[in-house]
Image (cartoon, coloured by chain):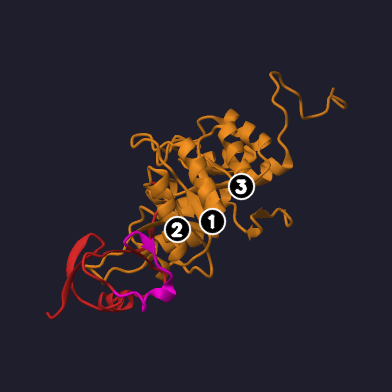
Amino acid sequence: MADDRLIIAGREFKSRLWVGTGKYKDFAETKKAIEVSGADVVTVAVRRVNITDRSKENLLDYIDPKKYTILPNTAGCYTVEDAVRYSRLARAAGVSDLVKLEVLGDERTLFPDTAGLIEAAKILIKEGFIVLPYTNDDPIVAQKLVDVGCPAVMPLAAPIGSGLGIRNPYNLKIIMEMIKVPIIVDAGVGTASDAAFAMELGADAVLMNTAIAGAKDPISMAQAMKYAVHAGRLAYKAGRIPRKLYATASSPIEGML
Amino acid sequence: MENAIKIQVNGDVRTWRSGATVADLLKELDIKTERVAVELNLEILDRAMFDQRSLKDGDRVEIMSFIGGGSF
């Protein structure tokens, strides 16, 4: 697996597990969980600086942007205008041209507004952004996102934070077969087997936050996810045996009494 | 305060002195200029402009930074 590299828009990523930085107890726990997970891409949100309480620490004092690829998201944006605005602010805050683009369609499901997503992606790509879109498990939408210039596509496994795991493996598999850019399964993973399953289907990477941060022991779960993603990738590359209804003996008949 | 103006910073109304720049505001608020983005009346400012753009009455300033987050 030495040459099993993940390359998106000319950037090489060492880890196929990407993690979010929300919902942790404190920054120390965030930092530790990320270290243990082995992830080299971490997502962050863009929000107002707390100007009344300046004693609050900065996340980037804990997560070194020289060590990790910081992937700002447009979490919480329900319109094209907001998503574009937040993306521009993220770039101005000075990390890179990368953005994880979210345009949400509904507060209860947090499912993406895919029409808005494609429109926002077009605008941002024209402005030089590297847009990684959080999308539905819809192969046609995924292809449209590639057509407008997204160098990777991030379909959901299940609703954000739901922990339901891979709800539609067949759609994800079709996306992985049809779409010729890296596919990062984003959102919905609940436990290690979900992450391994996504990788076994052929995902290029898995992005998660709640599954680790919300676990009883986030640090152990971060480690479990690291192994799961690695195991799933190895199994995918190794090629699983076909499913058969009946048994095939694995010991020879020859030499029996 | 002489030549006092009212500006909105991250949604809060503040009394400020006329002629002060965005850089002055950040300094006063004890905010490091690296890792923040500043939007002045919906226009995102280049960091190099912070000490050139002075604030006037009614200006709306948004100072944004990165916080922990996965998806929303």
Label located before the other in sequence (1 or 3): 1
Which chain, by letter, is red? B
Labels 1 and 2 in the same subunit: yes
Labels 1 and 3 in the same subunit: yes
Marks 1/2: CA distance?
9 Å
Q: Under tag 2, what secondary structure?
A: helix
Q: Chain A in the picture: what colour?
A: orange
- The part of the image, by quadrant, that contains residue A60 is bottom left
Q: Where is residue A163 in the image (x, y as percent from the top left)?
A: 43, 38
Q: Residue A201 or A154: which is nearer the viewer?
A: A154
B52 within the magenta span: yes
Q: Label 2 is placed on what type of residue?
A: Arg
In front: mark 1 or mark 2? 1
- Dot 2 corresponds to which residue? A88
Residue at 50 percent of width and 30 percent of height? A167
Identify the disc placed on residue A233: none
Q: Residue A65 or B10: which is nearer the viewer?
A: B10
Residue at 65 percent of width and 40 percent of height? A202
Marks 1/3: CA distance?
12 Å
- Dot 3 corresponds to which residue? A149
Q: Where is residue A206 in the image (x, y as percent from the top left)?
A: 55, 46
A205 displayed left or right of A107: right
Q: Are marks 2 and 3 in contact (CB under 8 Å)?
A: no
Q: Are marks 1 and 2 in contact (CB under 8 Å)?
A: yes
Q: What stretch is highlighted in magenta?
A: B41-54
Label located before the other in sequence (2 or 3): 2
- Dot 1 corresponds to which residue? A127
Q: Label 1 is placed on what type of residue?
A: Glu
Q: Main secondary structure of the magenta part?
A: loop
